[in-house]
């Protein structure tokens, strides 16, 4: 990273002058960069206003970019009007004062100032300043636009721009970059962004249906419905089919009444059966909170077999922290934590290592009763049993309880979904 920076605000609206005569040729309107795999996008040219026309000046004809002026060193200026080419971004028009994704921490930032530096290969965009100082420098030209350091500089190598507002860019956020973030972080980005920006993020993660489903599970209900409404019934069903059954049931209950049945019919089995079963419960009861996916094994299973079942299970990881034990008639008789299984001899039977005092809840219990039972028994995964204690209907994980207990809009209240300024 260069230590001496040149601010975009010190260049835009400044004169283009002839290197030999010093004559004023025109005014710089913008700088053009080409986005690609380069960590610091190269500047390929300038948009210059000459005689009321916006013209393209290639960077190879620029002898110097200085605070307050740009020096032209060429035989003549091409008088053809500037036309943006695919893959090009205009720093001032497209990026300045707009949201960008800071992939370090997964937060939105605003490009209040854009920083440039000259390297051995030419001029490059090296970072942005999202702080109030960057805003002042941009809005108050002059001394504030001169060369100086930028204390709030964010390296461009960790930034991904939105380009949905640039029709000719033919670029989208690379999925591989977003995939490095936790789904909850990606959901935070979507919630902090505009609808258009959020659509661009959702489109990027849509390259991986499993990741897209994980992100939708983390979105609040308002944003879930916002992005599902624009999809066809078939596309909505495809998304819901990839989500956890309990999250799919929560989402489909928020969709307009006339669309619920058609979307449900398009869900694959056994997802349709699971979702229909969950929809019969009030969302704030144990039945509405539970997931129908869990791991239960006969008491005659060995610890080795139980650990192998955990390893190969498709059940969500948070639910696999506990294995439930069934007696000879298939009734729940106990549970054992996965950590305890690791500590036990591999030849031991589940009947020998399981806790037989099975802390549990029932599907009609309200959230208060569920919390009390999970707290009393120190449960991270609570089984939901039928009235006769003959079968496990589903499980409630502690993260689902916490999410319900948190006040509405808590992520915004704590700044979790706000853009960094």
Image: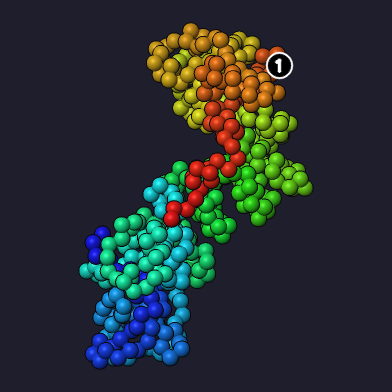
Q: Position of residue 226 (x, y in %)?
A: 64, 52
401 to 217, vertically: above or below: above
Q: Position of residue 242 (x, y in %)?
A: 59, 41
Tell me if residue 43 can be seen. no
Question: What is the secondary structure assignment of the residue under circle 1?
Answer: loop
Spot the residue most to the top.
352
Task: Count how many numbered circles sit on residues in the image.
Answer: 1
Q: Nearer the viewer, residue 198 or 246?
A: 198
- Displayed quadrant of residue 331: top right
Q: Residue at x 67, y 14 (%)?
A: 390
229 to 220, vertically: above or below: below
Q: Nearer the viewer, residue 372 or 41?
A: 372
In the drawing, does residue 188 fall left or right of residue 74? right
218 to 91, vertically: above or below: above
Q: Position of residue 118 (x, y in %)?
A: 26, 69
Q: Nearer the viewer, residue 18 or 409?
A: 409
Q: Position of residue 62 (x, y in %)?
A: 29, 80
Q: Nearer the viewer, residue 373 or 172?
A: 373
Which part of the image, by quadrant, shows the N terminus? bottom left
Q: Residue at x 55, y 41 (%)?
A: 410
Spot the residue most to the right.
258
Pointer 1 residue: 387
Q: Residue at x 67, y 25 (%)?
A: 366
Classify 10 Å Cα crowding around label 1: few (below 14), some (14-19), many (20 and above). Answer: few
In the drawing, does residue 386 fall left or right of residue 146? right
Q: Residue at x 43, y 55 (%)?
A: 421
- Displayed quadrant of residue 101: bottom left
């Amino acid at each position: 990273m260069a230590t001496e920076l040149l601010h975009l605000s010190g260049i835009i609206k400044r004169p283009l002058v002839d290197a030999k005569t010093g004559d004023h040729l025109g005014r710089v309107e913008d700088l053009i960069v080409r986005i690609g795999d380069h960590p610091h996008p190269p500047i390929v040219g300038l948009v210059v206003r000459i005689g009321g026309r916006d013209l393209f000046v290639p960077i190879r004809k620029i002898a110097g970019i200085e605070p307050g002026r740009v020096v032209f060193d060429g035989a003549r200026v091409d008088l053809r009007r500037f036309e943006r080419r695919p893959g090009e971004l205009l720093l001032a028009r497209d990026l300045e004062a707009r949201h960008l994704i800071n992939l370090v921490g997964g937060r939105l930032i605003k490009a209040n100032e854009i920083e440039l530096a000259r390297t051995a290969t030419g001029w490059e965009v090296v970072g942005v300043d999202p702080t109030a100082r960057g805003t002042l420098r941009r809005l108050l030209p002059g001394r504030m636009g001169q060369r100086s350091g930028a204390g709030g500089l964010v390296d461009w190598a960790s930034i991904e721009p939105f380009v949905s507002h640039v029709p000719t860019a033919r670029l989208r956020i690379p999925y591989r970059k977003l995939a490095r973030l936790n789904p909850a972080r990606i959901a935070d980005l979507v919630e902090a962004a505009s609808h258009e920006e959020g659509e661009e993020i959702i489109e990027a993660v849509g390259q991986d249906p499993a990741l897209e489903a994980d992100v939708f599970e983390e979105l609040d209900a308002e944003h879930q419905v916002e992005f599902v409404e624009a999809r066809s019934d078939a596309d909505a069903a495809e998304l819901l089919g990839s989500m956890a059954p309990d999250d799919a049931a929560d989402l489909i209950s928020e969709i307009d009444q006339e669309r619920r049945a058609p979307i449900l019919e398009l869900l694959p089995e056994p997802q349709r059966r699971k979702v229909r079963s969950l929809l019969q419960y009030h969302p704030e009861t144990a039945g509405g909170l539970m997931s129908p996916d869990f791991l239960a094994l006969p008491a005659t299973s060995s610890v080795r077999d139980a650990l192998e079942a955990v390893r190969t299970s498709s059940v969500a990881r948070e639910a696999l922290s506990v294995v439930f034990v069934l007696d000879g008639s298939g009734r729940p008789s106990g549970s054992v934590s996965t950590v305890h299984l690791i500590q036990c001899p591999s030849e031991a039977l589940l009947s020998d290592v399981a806790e037989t005092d099975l802390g549990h809840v029932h599907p009609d219990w309200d959230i208060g009763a569920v919390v009390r039972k999970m707290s009393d028994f120190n449960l991270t995964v609570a089984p939901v049993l039928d009235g006769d204690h003959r079968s496990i209907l589903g499980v409630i994980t502690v993260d689902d309880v916490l999410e319900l207990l948190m006040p509405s809009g808590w992520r915004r209240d704590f700044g979790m979904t706000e853009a960094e300024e």
